[in-house]
Image: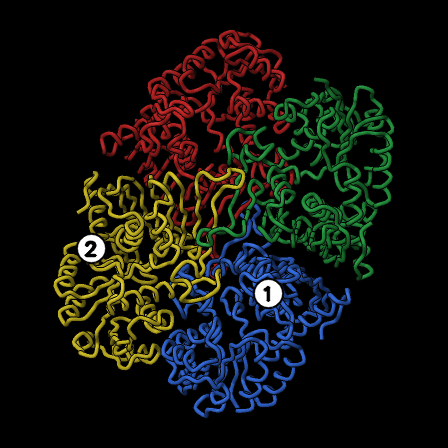
Chain colours: A green, B blue, C yellow, D red
Amino acid sequence: MKSLGIGLIGTGFMGKAHAFAYRAALAAFPDIPVPVLRTVADMTAAAAERAAAQYGFESATADWQSLVADPKIDVVSITTPNIFHKEMALAALAAGKHVHCEKPLAPTLAEAETMMQAAEAGGLVTQVGYNYIKNPMLKLARDMVAAGELGEITNFRGIHAEDYMADPEGLYTWRLDPEGGPGVVADLGSHIIGMARFLLGPIAEVNADIETVVKSRPVAPGSTERKKVLVDDIARLMVRFARGCGGSLEATWVNSGRKMQLAFELTGNKGSLVFNQEHFNEIHYYKAGLDPRHGGFTRIEAGPQHGPYGQFCVAAGHQLGFNDLKTIEMAEFLGAIGGGAKAGPDFREAWEIQKVVDAAVRASKSRSWLKVG
Amino acid sequence: MKSLGIGLIGTGFMGKAHAFAYRAALAAFPDIPVPVLRTVADMTAAAAERAAAQYGFESATADWQSLVADPKIDVVSITTPNIFHKEMALAALAAGKHVHCEKPLAPTLAEAETMMQAAEAGGLVTQVGYNYIKNPMLKLARDMVAAGELGEITNFRGIHAEDYMADPEGLYTWRLDPEGGPGVVADLGSHIIGMARFLLGPIAEVNADIETVVKSRPVAPGSTERKKVLVDDIARLMVRFARGCGGSLEATWVNSGRKMQLAFELTGNKGSLVFNQEHFNEIHYYKAGLDPRHGGFTRIEAGPQHGPYGQFCVAAGHQLGFNDLKTIEMAEFLGAIGGGAKAGPDFREAWEIQKVVDAAVRASKSRSWLKVG
Amino acid sequence: MKSLGIGLIGTGFMGKAHAFAYRAALAAFPDIPVPVLRTVADMTAAAAERAAAQYGFESATADWQSLVADPKIDVVSITTPNIFHKEMALAALAAGKHVHCEKPLAPTLAEAETMMQAAEAGGLVTQVGYNYIKNPMLKLARDMVAAGELGEITNFRGIHAEDYMADPEGLYTWRLDPEGGPGVVADLGSHIIGMARFLLGPIAEVNADIETVVKSRPVAPGSTERKKVLVDDIARLMVRFARGCGGSLEATWVNSGRKMQLAFELTGNKGSLVFNQEHFNEIHYYKAGLDPRHGGFTRIEAGPQHGPYGQFCVAAGHQLGFNDLKTIEMAEFLGAIGGGAKAGPDFREAWEIQKVVDAAVRASKSRSWLKVG
Amino acid sequence: MKSLGIGLIGTGFMGKAHAFAYRAALAAFPDIPVPVLRTVADMTAAAAERAAAQYGFESATADWQSLVADPKIDVVSITTPNIFHKEMALAALAAGKHVHCEKPLAPTLAEAETMMQAAEAGGLVTQVGYNYIKNPMLKLARDMVAAGELGEITNFRGIHAEDYMADPEGLYTWRLDPEGGPGVVADLGSHIIGMARFLLGPIAEVNADIETVVKSRPVAPGSTERKKVLVDDIARLMVRFARGCGGSLEATWVNSGRKMQLAFELTGNKGSLVFNQEHFNEIHYYKAGLDPRHGGFTRIEAGPQHGPYGQFCVAAGHQLGFNDLKTIEMAEFLGAIGGGAKAGPDFREAWEIQKVVDAAVRASKSRSWLKVG
C-alpha cells in the first residue's frame, strides 16, 4: 500500500485532534494509504517541536510555507483560525497538495468559493472538518432516509447549542472578531446545516433571526474596558429543503448548561429519528404502523453492525469518542486520496454549507425569506 | 363555604376531564366553594343521562340552552368542538354564568374578541382550558424567571408535537374543517404559545412557516374518495418577546411517534430550564457559575415543596397525572369565583394567545414578520 | 346498579388517597357499584369533620368502632398505622364488612394470618393497598410474561429505594417502633416483593442481608437525647422463584436523592422489560431476534391500548398520576364486591408477601437461605 | 525522555485495543516514556504480519517466546484467552519484562497468586486490563468518596450485564470451557468487583447465588449435537465491605438487550452517585441538604475539569470512547514504569479481585456467607 506524507499546520484543539486521527487511522482502517507524519508547523519553533515529539512527526517548523512546499508532503491539514484558511489552502493547493481544512471554510462566501475553485481546478482531494456526521449512527440515519424507511420526510428540527460564550462577563476573544466571519451561525450553525444537508440534501430557501445578546465584553480579565461585540450569539432559521419539506435550525453559543447539544428530530410519515450528540453512540427510532401495545421509540446503540464502528471495536455498546469520529474522517480522506470511495464534505460541500450561512445572515438583515445561492 | 352549581356541556375527551376535575377539586382544595354537579348536556338525552350517572350529576339534558338558563347553575363548562364555543359562551354569559371554555377559544380572532368583551362587560369569571401550565413545575419555572434566578432571558425554544394526524391515510375528521379555524397552529400551537406567554410574557412579533403536508385524506374507512385538507399540519414560528428576547415555537400533529412532546428549553444568562410534558413531574435546571467539577443540569422531581402538588400527595415523587392538572385548573377557577386569587388563563388571555395564532397564519401567508395584535 | 356504603378510618397520607379514589372510581369505571361516602373516622371529631366536609362524606366520627358497626356501611377502608390494622380489620370483618387495608397488612406474620383467616371464614372481599401494580404498564408486563413474549424468564432485579429516612439527624418516629414490625423490609420491601410475585409468581427461597445504618436518632427537634433504632434501614435479598429462576430484591429508605425508585429489570431469553416508577407511564421493552441494525429497548408510553388507561383519558401520553393508580385499585375492589372479576391483592396475597418479609428477616439473622412459608 | 520497547501477544478484540492505546498514549500524555512498537505475536505468522502492518509494529512473529526473550522489548502485553495468561506472564516476568495482562488474571486463584508473587519478586511493574475504572468520571467518584463528599457510605449496588450469551441457541465457545475458570462471575463480575473495590476498598465477606441458565449449547452452527455448559451465566452477590457498609453485585451475560450495563448506585448519608457505562461520559450526583425546591440528581458531563479528559480534548462534552479509556490505562502503565505515579490495578489488585470471585463461587456452592481471602 502506498504511503502519504502528512503536514499539519496548527497544534491547538483541532490540531491535536488531527494528530490523534492520523496516528489511529491505519490501525482502524488497514486498507488506506499509510499516513507518514512528516512535519508539524506552529507559530513558534518551540511549540512545533513540542508537538512533533508528542505526536510523532519527523520534523517541526515555524514556517508553514516551507511545510506546504515540502515535496515529501502530500497532504496538508489546516487547523488554524478561519482567518488564515484561504491563504494556507491556496498555497497548499498550488503546491499540488491534498488539503484538509477545518470548518467553517472561510470568513466569507466569496473566499470559500475561491478555495473551492482552486481545489477543483487542481483536481485535488479536499475535506472539511464536519466531523460529527462521520458518526456511524448518522450514516445509519442517512441510509434509512435514502432507503425510504421513514417514508416521505415532513420535518427536520435541528439545533447546535453550547455555552462557551454564555457568561456575559466572558472575555472578548478572536472568535468575536468580525474579520473571521459571522459568529455562532458560522461556528456552530454550519455543523447543523451540514448535518441537515447530509441527511436530507440541499436547502433551497431560508429565513432567519440572528442576534447578538451579549452586546459588549471585557477586553481582559479584571479590566473595566469593554469591547462591542459585532458578531451573533444566537441564530434561528426556518428553512425549506429542495426535496420539498421544511424545517427549523438553531445555533447558539450562549445556551447556559449545554456543552454539546447538537441534536435533531427528523420526521417522515413512516417514522422518526431522534439524535443528540450528548449521547452520540445511540439514535432513537420510531417506526409507524407496528402493534401499538408495544410501539414507541427504540434506542439503537451503536455496534459493529453500524459501520464503521466495527473498525474500532468488535463488541456493541463500547462506544466511540470524539477523537474516533475524527479518525473516521481522516481515514475516509486518506482513502479517497488513495483512490477509494469519495469522502466528504469537500470544499464544494463546505461552500454549499456556507451559502446557507450567508443567506441566513442576509435574510435576518432583510427580515425576509431568501433563496440560497 | 358557599357552593356553586355546575353545568357541563359535552361529555367527550374534555367533558370527562372536567367531570373528574369537578369531583376531585374540593378534596384537593378544601377552601374553594363547593361544586355541586347539577346538569350535564350532550347531543342526545341518552348520552347525557349515561354521563350524569357516571359522573354524579343531578340531571341530564339534550338541550344545552336549558342548562344555560337554569338558575341553579352558576358555572358552565363548555367542552364541545370550537365551532360551538361562541354561541354557547355568549348564551351562558348573557345568563350571568361564569364560564369555563376549552381551548382554543374560537375559530377566529374576531369571535374570540367578542367572547372576551362579553365576559368583561358582564364582570364574570372566565377560564380557558390551557391545563398544562397548571403543573407545579411550570409554576416553579415561572417563579424562577420572575425572581431573576435565570438572569436575563435570552432564548426560548418551544414545541408541541403529537402524531394523531401523522398517518397520511388517516381519515378526514371535524378537526380538519376550516370552519373550525386553523389546524395545528391553533390546536397545539396555542398550548406552546400560551406556555411561552405564561413564562415570559407577551409576544410582540412573529414570523412563520405553516404548511399542510397531508394534502388529502379518505372520507371514510376503505373509501377511495379523498377530501382536500385545507388546514395546516405543521407550524414553525420565529418570535420576538416584548421583553426583548427571541425564540422559536413549533406545532405539529404529524410528528410520527410523539404522543405528548410539549417541551421547551428556556435560557437565561444565569441558567436554563428544560421541560418536557412526556415527563411532566420533573424539570431540569442548570445554574451557571457553580463548581464546574459538579455542575450540570439537575433533575428536579415534583414534591409538596412545589405547590400545589401537596394538595394531592404529601410525599415527593408520587406524581400527578393529567387529570390532576385539570383538577388544579378547575379548583383555581372555582376559587376565583369565590373571591380567591385571580386564576387564568381567562378569555382575555385566550384572546391574546389567539392573536399570536392569527398573526402567525398571516405572517406565513405574507412570508414576512408581523407585529402581534 | 347497586351501591355500597363506604366507611374510611384514617385521614392522613393514605386516607386522602382513598378518599380521592372513591370519589373518582365511578367516573372512570361506570360499571362498578356506586360508592356512597358514608362516614369517615379519625382520632378527633374535629379532624374527622374536616375530612368529611373536604371529601364529601355524609358523617364523621372519632369512634371507629361505631363506623364499623354501622349497618349502612358495606365497605371499610383502614389507613391507620400498621399497629392498628388487626384490631380494626377483625372488627370490620366480624361485622360483615368488606375490608380494604393499607399495607403491610400487620406487624407480624401471625397477625396477618389471623386476619386472612377471618376474611376467608367470613367469605368477605378484601384488598390490601399495593397500588403500584395497578399501573397499566405493570398489567402489560404481567400479560407479556404470562403469554411467553419474553421467553423463559431468567432473572429479576428489583428495588424500592426512597430517602425519607436518609438524614441521620432525622427524628425518631412511629415508623421506627419495632412494635409495628420490621422497618424498610416491610414498608418498602413489601412493595417490590409484591411486584415480583405479581409478575413472576411465588418466591420459594430467600437469603438476605438486612441492616440498620442509622443506629440512633434524636427524639425531638433540637434535642440531644437520642433513641436507639431497632428496625432496619436497608434490606438486600437474594431470591429463588418457584418457577425456577432467581433474582435480587432491595429495599432502602436511606437512599439519598431517591423519592420513588421502585424499579425492576426482568429478563427472559426472548426479551427484557425495564420499569421505574420514577417514570411510571412507560416501560422499556427489548425483543430479541430482531434486525440488529434497528434493535434496542423500546420506550412504550401508556395509552388507551393499555387498559385501564383509557378509563381516564382517550389520548395516549397524557399520563396517569399516583391517585389514579389508587382509583384503579378501589374500582377493582368495588367491582369485585359487586360480583365482577376477582381483584387483589387480597389478605391472602398480603399474607404471602408477608411470609417473604418474615423469611428474609429470619434469613438475615441466621445468615442462611430459608424456604418461604 | 526514555523510550520503552513494546511487545504485544494476541491481536483480537483486546489486542487491537492495546495497539490503539499504545499508538495514542504519547499524543495524549506527552510526559510518559515513548512507546516503541517492536513486535507483535499471533498464532500464525500471517496474522501477526498483518497486525504489524496495520498497527505499525517493527516486526511480527508466531513465536511468543521469542518476543518475550527479545532484549529490545521492555514491556509485554498479553491479550490471549485466560488459559494462556500464566505461562506467558511468568515467562515475560522471568525475562525481566514489565507485563500488562488482560483480565481476569488467571483461571484460578492459585494461578493468579503465583503470577502476583513472580511480579513482586522481580520488582516489575504490572497492570491488568480493568479499563472501565480509567474513566475520568470514575476517578471523580473515587475522589468524592475519599474526600467525604458523600458522607458515610451506606450502600453500593453494582451490576455488569451484557447479552452476548443470551441466545440459548448461541454456540458453545471457548468462553464456556471450565478450564478457563468460572463463567460470567469472572468475565464480567470481575469488572464490577474491581470497580467496587476501586471506589470503596476491600470486600470482606460475600454470599452468592451463581447459576447456569442455558444448560447446553450447540457445538456448531446447524448441529443437533449439544454440549453441556459447566460455567455460570448469572451471578448475584451480597457483599460486606471492610469499611463497614454492605452492597449487592450482579453479573450476567444473558441479560437480553444489554450491551454494556456496567452500572452502580453508591449512596452515602450526604449524597449519592449514579453511573452507567451506557453513558459513561457522565455521572449523576445528588447532594443532600440543598434547597429542596431546586434539589435533585445533577447530570455531570465529562470535561477538562475532570482529569485526564483534557489530555484528549480541551472542550467539555465531546466525549471519550472505549479506546480512550484503554489509552489512559496504557499511559498510566508506561508512566509508572518510567517512575511516575503508581498505576493499577496491578497483579496484586487483580489477585484481590480474584479472591472475591473465588469466594463467591464457593459461597454459592456452600450456600453460606464466606470471608474473602
- The answer for which chain carries disc 2 is C
Distance between the Cα atoms at labels 2 and 1? 51 Å
Whether marks 2 and 1 lie on the same chain = no
Q: Which residue is mark 2?
A: C351
Left or right of C107, for residue B352: right
Q: Amino acid at mark 1?
A: Val
Q: Quadrant of residue A31?
A: top right
Which secondary structure, mark 1?
helix
**In the rendered view of the protein, which quadrant contains the N terminus of chain A?**
top right
Badge 2 crowding class, 10 Å Cα cut-off, few under 14, some 14 to 19, many 20 or more, is: many
Which secondary structure, mark 2?
helix
Q: Quadrant of residue A122?
A: top right
Q: Position of residue C289 (x, y in %)?
A: 45, 38
User: Compared with residue B3, is residue C296 higher up or lower down, i.e. above or below?
Assistant: above
Badge 1 crowding class, 10 Å Cα cut-off, few under 14, some 14 to 19, many 20 or more, is: many
Left or right of D249, for residue C83: left
Image point 53% across, 87% down: which residue? B92
- The answer for which chain carries disc 1 is B
Q: Position of residue D202 (x, y in %)?
A: 36, 32
Image point 71% across, 29% down: which residue? A341
Q: Position of residue A126 (x, y in %)?
A: 78, 32
Note whether residue B90 is visible: yes
Instruction: Choose mark 2 or mark 1, whichever is in front.
Output: 2
| Disc on res. B145 | 1
Q: Position of residue C329 (x, y in %)?
A: 31, 64
Left or right of C214, for residue C276: right
